[in-house]
Image (cartoon, rainbow, N blue to C red):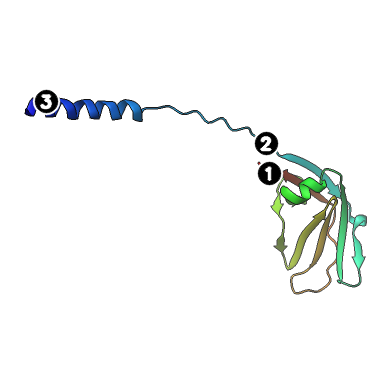
Amino acid sequence: MKTKLLLAVLVLALGSLVSGCKKEYITQELIPNTTIQTSVATNNWTYDSNTKTYFAQINMPEITDGTNQTDGVLVYISGDGTTWEALPDVYNGTTIIYTYKPGVLYLEIQGSDGSTVNPPGNLYVKIVLVASAS
């Protein structure tokens, strides 16, 4: 009797091991990001007397209505084109932020205390459009 019971337990255990070794392959389609590099010259900054800030407009046809609604937009700046800082950023008492809508991206600069500061020199700008999987 013990032998039959032991044999039954072994068969069940072996059966569960075999069914538990099922391999499953999941293939995920990768959606590439898009990176755009541009620059903003010193003379491209415009003063807004209402907000007391300087802003620069970058035309971005890559930011479509769909991009604006579902994807991510990341912006980085550099003074030398080598060392990048992510925006928004506060550096030496100066705040730089960005906003965007379809077709255009704005950089805005002001003092971290809300004061007006002079626009920076030439800036390199890297814009990364992160596509959404949905």
Q: Secondary structure at mark 2?
A: loop
Compare residues 99 and 29 and report the one nearer the observer: 29
Looking at numbered disc 3 in the image, what kind of residue is underneath it? Answer: Lys
Secondary structure of the residue carrying tag 3 is helix
Query: Which residue: 82% across, 48% down?
Result: 65
Task: Find residue 29 and report its image quarter.
Answer: top right
User: Is residue 72 visible to us here?
Assistant: no
Amino acid type shown at disc 1:
Ser
Q: CA distance from mark 1 to mark 2?
A: 8 Å
Foreground label between 1 and 3: 3
Residue designated by label 2: 31
Residue of label 3? 4
**Quadrant location, the N terminus:** top left
Q: Which residue is mark 1?
A: 132
Mark 1 vs 3, N-terminal side:
3
Tell me, for residue 23, which label it has, or none.
Answer: none
Give the mark nearest the N terminus, 2 or 3: 3
Q: Position of residue 13 (x, y in %)?
A: 24, 29
